[in-house]
Structure formats: C-alpha cells, structure tokens
Amino acid sequence: MSNIIVVGAQWGDEGKGKIVDYLTEGTDVVVRAAGGNNAGHTVINGGTKYILHLIPSGILWKDKLCVIGNGVVMDPIGLIEEMNKLRGQGVTIEPDNLLISETCHLVLPYHRALDLAREVKRGDKKIGTTGRGIGPAYADKVERSGIRAILLTRPAELEEELRHRIAEHNVTLRDVGVDEVPADETVAKILAAAAILAPHVTNTTVRLHEAIQAGKKLLFEGAQGTYLDIDHGSYPFVTSSNTTAGGACTGSGVPPRMIDHVVAVAKAYTTRVGSGPFTTENEAIGDMLHNMGREFGATTGRARRCGWLDMVLIRYAVMINGADELAITNLDGLDGLDSIKICTAYRLDGKVIHYPPATISDIEKCEPIYEEHQGWKQDLSTIRDYKDLPDLAKSYLNRLSELAGARIALVGIGPSRDQTLIA
Ligand code: IMP
C-alpha cells in the first residue's frame, strides 16, 4: 500500500501539477482536498498544455478516479467551464471518473463579488487574492452559513437556500458599496449548473475508504503551498484553507495512519504571487526568469515575484508536513547563472534564526544569510537521466537535501512529462 500526499513547500506554483501527473502513473485515485479554483496546475503532455484549477490532474489519465474532496470549495460555474475546456482538448470526464464530495462547500457569485470588493477596500494592505471568492466561501463554511454540494442534487432545496443566502449577502455587498448579485439570474445559473454536476456528487469519503480496502493507491494533490496555509503561512497574506499535509486528511476523510509518504515540492528558486513579505526576493532573478517567458501565473496571468531559494522556509515545510521526500522543480531556470545563492538562515535583530517568525513585521526585518554556489552554465532541459546532470547541479541538489533534511526523489528540468528525473 502506498498513499501519498503531495504538498507545496513554498508559496504555491511549485510545479506540483507536473509532479502529481508524474506520480499518478503508479496510483489509482487522485484527490484534491483543499482550496478551490484559485489553484492553477499546468501540465504539458504530448505537446498539449492543460490547465487545471479544480479538477485533479489525474483526469488526464484514462483509468484514474479523480475526487474533489470535502475540504475543497467548489465553484459550480467555474468547474463546468473547466470541464468543457478539457473536453474540448479530448479529455474524458464522466460521473464515474470525477467525483465531487457532497459536503464540499460551493463558491457562489456573491463570494466572488465580496472577495473583489474587500480587496479594493483593503487598499495598499490588499492580500492580492486570485479574486475567485475563496476567502468569503470558507468564511461562510466556518460561520456555518455555507451551501454544500449535496444541494446540487436537490433543486427545490437549493433554490430556497440560494434565495435566502443571496438576500443575506446582498446586504453585505450594499454595505461595502458594490452591486448586488441579481437573484433570479443567479438562481437560474446555479440550478442549470446543478443539473450538470449532480451525477458527480456522492459520499467521496466512503468511496475513498472502499478504494483503500480494495488495495488501491491514493495520491493527494496539494494546492497552493505551505506558506499560504491559513495556520502555518505568512498570515494574513495566505489563502483560507489548510494547504499543508494535515489538510489532506481533514479535507478527504482519510485518516493520518493511512498515509505512507509525503512529498514536498519546491522550486529550485522561490516565487510568490500576491502581497506579503518575501525575504529572498531579487528583482534581477525575476527579470531573468520573466525574460525566459517563465513565472506568469496559470490562474491570473500575473507575473510572479521571484528570488533565491529560501531553505529556512523549506526546512520548516519539511518539518510541519512530515515530508520524507522532496521534488525539486524548475532546476533549468538557473541554467544561465554564474553563481547561485541559497538562503540558509535569517538574521533578526542581530540574532541568527533558522525558522520563519510569526509576524509580518518580524519577517520584514529578517535579513537573509546566503551561501553561494557555482552555477553549472549548461542547458539541462535535454537531460533524461539524473546521473547525466552536471556535477555542479548535483552538488547544488545535495546541499538542498542536506539543509532540508529530506531525500530528493524527483528533479524537474522542464515542463513536459519526460523532463522529470528520478534521483
Ligand atoms: P486566495 O486564495 O484567492 O484568497 O488568495 C490568497 C493568497 O494566496 C494570494 O496571495 C494569492 O495570490 C495566493 N494564492 C492562491 N492560490 C494560489 C495558487 O494556486 N498559487 C499561488 N498563489 C496562490
């Protein structure tokens, strides 16, 4: 038995989609357990580029079961758009290969409107959300006023609940000074979406346990990254769910003792979208990567902020996720550099620390302590065997592994499925 959780060790966008796609070959069921369509996973296969937001990337494989777990917040209209786009690319999506948890919460048009309005209100303190309504949807869930996917199978109840919640949220929308959500139009749209999605809605926890009993292997596809976790991330510049390994269990109903491995995915450098402190941020690295056509967000198209690899963050991520293996992606992004820096610790108020501080003001005061490595100055993208990597690239990876306290299992040297090396 081998059930694996894949998590991001940084601020999301670590290339998890590709690593999950790679690991999917040896698994039977792929599960999303947190987040929503704020995620954007890019997978390139057979020359075709697929962008996934809510649907687990296992959908690109013919015989895999994909599950949207109870911990996800699911935008019915966004999900249908995504399904249609993938179908247009030849992907098969049926009620028997894509299951939606009956207890996952819906993201509705008023959540999006509130998300955008609150960001405007925050002014220069804005979080830089994806504008997908994620925060307001999770807020309703925790406040116990959310609508769950089970109602997609009960149109009369859904309509009644929607009308009630639209009226309630329109009061809030008026308060923040933005347009109300039109009730009749919204109800009609969601009912139409419900008719399409209802056959996919089921008790996914039972289905996952049945799969485990039958000896099937599960892969939990993490969304976002450790430092966007609502508890462990750089609060308040975080998303609204538990993006760390524990979230895979609460967000699916699969208990911790049924998990065998945790793989943490990290880029060979650091990126972040949205606001918030970023200790190793470096504009020159950003310019270099953007000029290479890299590091633009899959969901929003925004240019990502870039910087040197921060091992303080990765070591802490390995610890709280219980990661036994690391997948390092985008190593080829560093191909052109003469010299590469790794941040090994921070200096805060004159003291050397090895963990990220809790407050934004302390993080902002942290100075990175770097060690420097000689660059390999070679195109890695055509290499197909780990042992063929240049010695300088291997020593960079060995140092990462040593600093992180986890074995490097996979190394990405390009976006395609065959550009993943087994270490
Ligand atoms: P939200 O999840 O849209 O509320 O956004 C909150 C923060 O998480 C913002 O900084 C977003 O840019 C960031 N974020 C959310 N999803 C992703 C993702 O998939 N990759 C990278 N950043 C993300």
Image (cartoon, grey):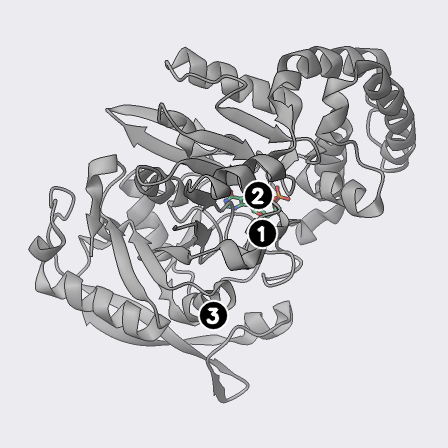
Circle 3 packing at 10 Å, graded few (<14), some (14-19), many (20+), is: some
User: Could you tell me which residue is drawn at 40 percent across and 29 percent down?
Assistant: 64
Q: Decide: marks 2, 1 in contact (CB < 8 A)? A: yes
Q: Secondary structure at mark 3?
A: helix
As drawn, 65 above or below 244: above
Query: What type is the residue that disc 3 sits on?
Result: Met
| Mark pair 2, 1: CA separation | 8 Å
Label at residue 249: 1
User: Could you tell me which residue is drawn at 60 percent across and 75 percent down?
Assistant: 362
Q: Nearer the viewer, residue 354 or 289?
A: 354
51 horizontally vs 400: left or right? right
**Which of marks 3 and 1 precedes in the sequence?**
1
As drawn, 300 above or below 307: above
Q: Can the viewer see residue 39 in this picture?
A: no
Q: Nearer the viewer, residue 414 or 253?
A: 253
Place of residue 45 in the rendered image (x, y in percent of width and height, measured from the top left): 28, 28
46 horizontally vs 118: left or right? left
Residue on which the image places disc 2? 33
Query: What type is the residue that disc 2 sits on?
Result: Ala
Q: Secondary structure at mark 2?
A: loop
Circle 1 packing at 10 Å, graded few (<14), some (14-19), many (20+), is: many
Q: Can the viewer see residue 406 in this picture?
A: yes
As drawn, 406 above or below 328: below
Q: Decide: marks 3, 2 in contact (CB < 8 A)? A: no
